[in-house]
DNA sequence: CGCCGCCTTGAACTGTATCAAGCAAAGTGG
DNA sequence: CCACTTTGCTTGATACAGTTCAAGGCGGCG
């Protein structure tokens, strides 16, 4: 019942009994993967949609010079490309940052659900639109903020997203990233990330050790990162009636 | 007939007579806007989908300090958020970079087409997935490349996109941007953009004056920008049969 | 004509990268 | 269970890409 997909999508709409049952069915058959493995590689043409139930994953691209850029994080409740079957091939890879539990939903099942459960279809569409909004906000982050603000913003975003799926307790949550990966996310070197983190600790903003982040002063962190959560579209829309599933 | 939407979407699929006619109908009623005006503002909840027929537009966000980040360019053939009616409000604004001709497609018409013309629906979905891929590539651009490569990459991307809609002739096309706007796109100051452009001119890579960009050596520019067009998904998929419209 | 937006140039400054080394914790294999 | 390796974190010194500030020029437009 209490699965992260249902939980996440519920912040967009209320599901019928039937909807909820269908969503839970989807998550019945799961596979376990170990940290560090890749779910999908650039160039692949997957025939299932992967849906993350436990653990963290990330989208990334490699560059000719061996550098890597992380372009998104996936946390429990997130889907890897609902409509991947439209494009010819993946233009990026998806790797796992922790051991993970994943449900692979065959294309046909996916299509059937999208057809027969408009409310679910709409909620999934909402989720992909939010993903897009997150990409835009990352561009803002990389283009306009200094190192300190960049990381502050990232931490705020992950806190909000993790909270949405019930994985934050007392402003504390899993963040299974190395400092180098943080750097590859916001376009900094690991050395500089290290120094920024130290400053954050010194200023009693956060604690980060092992794979756990504790945010001590979220208001201040939001201010520093110029974080405004509206782009996450967490609030319910006023009315959902009379909406097509597109 | 020869309208940029049809032309763009044709690079994804072949339309039937009926599809083409419907697409052309959409572009029958157009509005003209002048350069500098805003099509949609952050916070709006538009009830039409705007579709750009002539001219350039851009998505942008303002920051508390007054800085601006450009998060996308829209060129003829591009749509502003097909499914905007899913989200509660716009999380960014869309402004015009030149005088423009725009078709406003009422929500109901949009929904009707999506329902009754699966091939069009699929093509539009393809277009939004490409938009998303472009966002990811921009993140890579901002995170991993130096000023010279950033601008080289941007110019290559715009050249490919403009070519797709038939607006490039002899490697020359409209680029109605100030140096400051270029800077707001890739996260540089206008001063530095200026110096980079001068270097590009000195090295006979481009000419840029007025609002026209000429690329003299696209191969070299691609190499400098590490540009690889696969993320634009310009190639046809092998088979389009037996696909749902999702 | 005179103003204003945009481009250009120069000089000084700084945030972040680079390079290099050391250290601690966690695996790994014998 | 201990040596060994690996991986991630930390620190310092130095270098430079890109910023900031400031001023001048030029072309288009009211």
Image: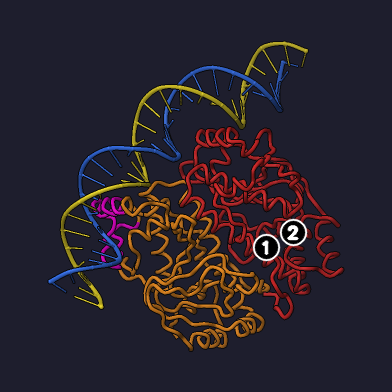
Chain colours: A red, B orange, C blue, D yellow
- In percent of width and height, residue B48 lies at 56, 80
| Residue at mark 1 shares a chain with residue at mark 2 | yes
User: Which mark, by number, is residue A127?
Assistant: 1
Camera-nearest residue between C12 and B104: C12
- In percent of width and height, residue A145 lies at 48, 49
B212 is within the stretch colored magenta = yes
Q: In the picture, which quadrant includes the N terminus of chain B?
A: bottom left
> Which chain letter matches label 2?
A
- In percent of width and height, residue A157 lies at 62, 51
Q: Residues within 10 Å of mark 1 (few under 14, many from 20)?
A: many
Residue drawn at (67%, 67%) of the image: A125
- Residue that carries the numbered disc 2 in the rendered image: A8
| C-alpha span from label 1 to label 2 | 9 Å
- On screen, residue A39 above or below B101: above
Camera-nearest residue between A171 and B35: A171
B159 is within the stretch colored magenta = no
Can residue A42 be seen here? The reply is no
- On screen, residue A175 above or below B195: above
Can residue B210 be seen here? The reply is yes
Q: Residues within 10 Å of mark 2 (few under 14, many from 20)?
A: many
For residue C29, side relative to residue B65 (left or right): right
Q: Earlier in the sequence, mark 1 or mark 2?
A: 2
Mark 1 and mark 2 residues within 8 Å of each other at the beta carbon = yes
- On screen, residue B69 above or below A38: below
- In percent of width and height, residue B102 lies at 46, 80
Quadrant assignment, res A17: bottom right
Residue drawn at (37%, 73%) of the image: B98
> Which chain letter matches label 1?
A
- Magenta range is B194-218
- On screen, residue B120 above or below A40: below
Q: Secondary structure at mark 2?
A: helix
């Amino acid at each position: 019942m209490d699965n992260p997909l249902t939980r996440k999508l519920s912040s967009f709409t209320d599901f019928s009994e039937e909807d909820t049952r269908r969503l839970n069915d989807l998550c019945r058959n799961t596979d376990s993967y170990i940290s560090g493995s890749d779910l999908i590689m650039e160039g692949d043409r997957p025939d299932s949609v992967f849906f993350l139930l436990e653990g963290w994953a990330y989208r990334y691209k490699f560059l000719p010079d061996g550098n890597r850029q992380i372009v998104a994080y996936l946390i429990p409740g997130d889907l890897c490309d609902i409509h991947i079957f439209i494009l010819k091939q993946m233009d990026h890879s998806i790797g796992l940052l922790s051991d993970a539990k994943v449900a692979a939903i065959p294309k046909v099942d996916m299509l059937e659900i999208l057809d027969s459960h408009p409310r679910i279809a709409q909620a999934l569409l909402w989720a992909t639109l939010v993903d897009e909004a997150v990409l835009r906000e990352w561009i803002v982050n990389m283009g306009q903020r200094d190192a300190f603000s960049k990381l502050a913003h990232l931490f705020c975003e992950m806190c909000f997203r993790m909270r949405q799926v019930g994985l934050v307790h007392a402003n504390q949550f899993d963040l299974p990233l190395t400092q180098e990966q943080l750097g590859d996310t916001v376009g900094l070197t690991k050395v500089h990330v290290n120094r920024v983190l130290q400053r954050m600790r010194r200023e009693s903003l956060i604690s980060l050790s092992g794979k756990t982040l504790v945010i001590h002063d979220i208001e201040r962190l939001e201010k520093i990162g110029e974080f405004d959560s509206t782009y996450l579209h967490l609030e319910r829309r006023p009315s959902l009636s009379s909406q097509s599933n597109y």
